[in-house]
Amino acid sequence: MASQLLPLELIDKCVGSRIWVIMKGDKEFSGTLVGFDDYVNMVLEDVTELYEQHLHYCFSSTG
């Protein structure tokens, strides 16, 4: 039978690994997890902010 991990235990196993963090407001970061606290504030190094560029198309009609 597989054992279950608590959320903080899972995050602790990721220390030293590259992670992808999705924030509220659509901000995304990728970096190496250095540490975290009980409130899941994280310290990352070698961080890259990821973003998706939205393309807007304008159509006009000339009469």
Image (cartoon, helix red, strand yellow):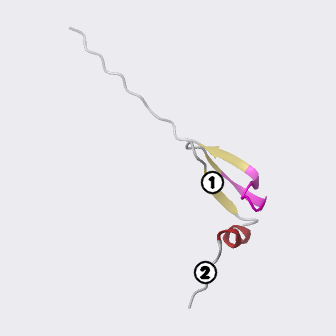
Provide residue 62's location: percent of width, then percent of height.
24, 10
Distance Cα–Cα, label 2 vs label 1: 22 Å
- Residue 17, given in percent of the width and then of the height, sits at 71, 65
Please name the residue shown 25% across and 14% down the image.
61
Q: Amino acid at mark 1?
A: Val
Q: In the figure, is residue 53 to the left or right of 13?
A: left
Tell whether position 14 is magenta.
Answer: no
From the image, tell me which residue sits under label 1.
21
Q: Is residue 37 left or right of residue 55?
A: right
Label 1 Cα crowd, 10 Å radius (few <14 / some 14-19 / many 20+): few
Image point (65%, 74%), residue name? 6
Farthest left residue in view: 63
Q: If the image is split into quadrants, where does the N terminus sit?
A: bottom right
Query: What residue did someone put label 2 on?
Result: 4
Q: Which dot marks residue 52? A: none
Could you tell me which quadrant the C terminus lies in? top left
Q: Which residues are magenta?
A: 30-46
